[in-house]
Image (cartoon, grey):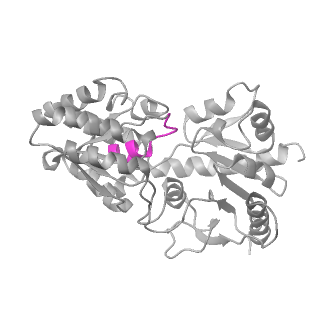
């Protein structure tokens, strides 16, 4: 049987309800009915987009990376797709371009990825596959130091009409952090800031919703072990892992959502979802976040003394500002709605096939 597009997930992504990470959720959201999605391992209930098949690693004495490559080639030969899409694996995309048209979708800083760390590798990759990034920040990083190469932007998206929403008057006086509870996300900065301002705002509460990884089996980590007593002292509730639908519901109920990322966010899906749910946002000024939120959020660096504390206090003290930012956020989120994203996806898929036909022989 022949399918139009085969999507190969990164090895750690699980295309499973209740366990899916950001890439799997995005793939499911925009997948066409005829798409095949392939990943490592058999799963329980797959996400609804496309049709999932597990990659079968061959039992031969080779390194795991080569076994994955061979499994992907076998899947391509089985599905015979017009296009294969690879997420976050430049090395794999370059290898598979030998066997058919490939489009690479980058969700993180490509300069940290195997197969794209050097200028030479990125220029070579761009000659053989259509390279797409989820933000202009990502594509700029890919082009750094390179000559004239082609990159395209394919923004992440949401289904705005499917998101839960509550009007301003029905929102709870809650400040919510939602996502992976790791140092890069600045969660400890949020705990510190809340501890400094909570006494002046006794009617408010702070909540951390998430764990080290996506899924109920997320492990306890040294970072979490250190953070828990700090959060308890500061009066911050930590819920642990919560399924994505419940996270969205919490975003629709909370007055404020904080995205205090310490690292250079390549896109900022949490911020987009929170804007779509109508919450007022405090976001870090790092990576792609400023471009994503525009004028619909307050910006505060989690490591700048007093910055996050000031932003939180300002929002808690100003009802009109929270209401205005919530409304602006909904307007901003509409720019990333799924209808436009699917149109863009179709264009990029056709371009990737045409690009492969013009590319030099591998």
Residue 274 versus residue 162 in the image, above or below: above
Residue 265 covered by magenta stretch:
yes
Q: Residue at x 19, y 30 (%)?
A: 313
Residue 177 spot, x, y in % from top left: 31, 46
Q: Residue at x 57, y 45 (%)?
A: 107
Q: Quadrant of residue 233?
A: top left
As drawn, is 236 to the left or to the right of 85?
left
The magenta span reads 264-276
Residue 295 spot, x, y in % from top left: 34, 28
Residue 264 versus residue 74 in the image, above or below: above
As drawn, is 224 to the left or to the right of 34?
left
Residue 69 in view: yes
The residue lying toward the viewer, choosing from 344 and 282, is 282
Residue 218 spot, x, y in % from top left: 44, 61
Residue 195 covered by magenta stretch:
no
Residue 327 in view: no
Q: Quadrant of residue 14?
A: bottom right
As drawn, is 336 to the left or to the right of 53?
left
Disc tally is 0
Q: Residue at x 17, y 48 (%)?
A: 171
Helix, strand or loop: magenta stretch: helix
Q: Residue at x 43, y 67 (%)?
A: 18
């Amino acid at each position: 049987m022949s399918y139009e597009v085969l999507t190969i997930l990164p090895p750690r992504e699980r295309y499973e309800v209740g366990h899916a990470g950001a890439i799997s959720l995005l793939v499911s959201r925009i997948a066409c009915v005829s798409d095949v999605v392939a990943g490592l391992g058999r799963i329980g209930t797959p996400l609804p987009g496309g049709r999932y098949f597990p990659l079968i690693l061959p039992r031969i004495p080779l390194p795991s990376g080569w076994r994955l490559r061979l499994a992907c080639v076998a899947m391509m030969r089985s599905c015979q797709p017009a296009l294969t899409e690879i997420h976050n694996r430049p090395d794999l995309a370059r290898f598979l371009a030998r066997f058919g048209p490939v489009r690479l979708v980058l969700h993180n800083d490509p300069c940290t990825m195997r197969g794209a760390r050097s200028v030479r590798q990125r220029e070579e990759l761009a000659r053989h596959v259509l390279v797409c990034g989820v933000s202009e920040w990502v594509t700029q990083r890919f082009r750094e130091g390179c000559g004239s190469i082609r990159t395209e932007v394919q923004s992440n998206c949401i289904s705005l009409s499917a998101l839960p929403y509550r009007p301003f008057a029905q929102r709870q006086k809650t400040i919510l952090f939602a996502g992976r509870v790791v140092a890069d996300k600045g969660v400890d900065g949020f705990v510190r800031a809340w501890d400094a301002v909570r006494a002046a705002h006794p009617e408010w509460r702070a909540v951390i919703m998430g764990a080290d990884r996506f899924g109920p089996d997320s492990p306890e980590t040294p970072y979490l072990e250190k953070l828990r007593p700090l959060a308890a002292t500061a009066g911050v509730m930590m819920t642990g892992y919560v399924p994505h639908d419940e996270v969205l519901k919490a975003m629709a109920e909370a007055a404020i959502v904080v995205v205090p990322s310490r690292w250079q966010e390549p896109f900022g899906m949490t911020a987009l979802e929170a804007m779509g749910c109508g919450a007022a946002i405090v976001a870090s000024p790092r990576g792609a976040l400023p471009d994503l939120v525009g004028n619909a959020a307050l910006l505060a660096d989690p490591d700048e003394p007093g910055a996050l504390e000031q932003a939180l206090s300002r929002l808690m003290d100003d009802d009109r500002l929270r209401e205005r930012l919530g409304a602006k956020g909904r307007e901003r989120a509409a720019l990333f709605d799924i209808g436009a994203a699917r149109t863009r996806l179709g264009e990029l898929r056709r371009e990737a096939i045409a690009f492969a036909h013009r590319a030099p022989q591998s």
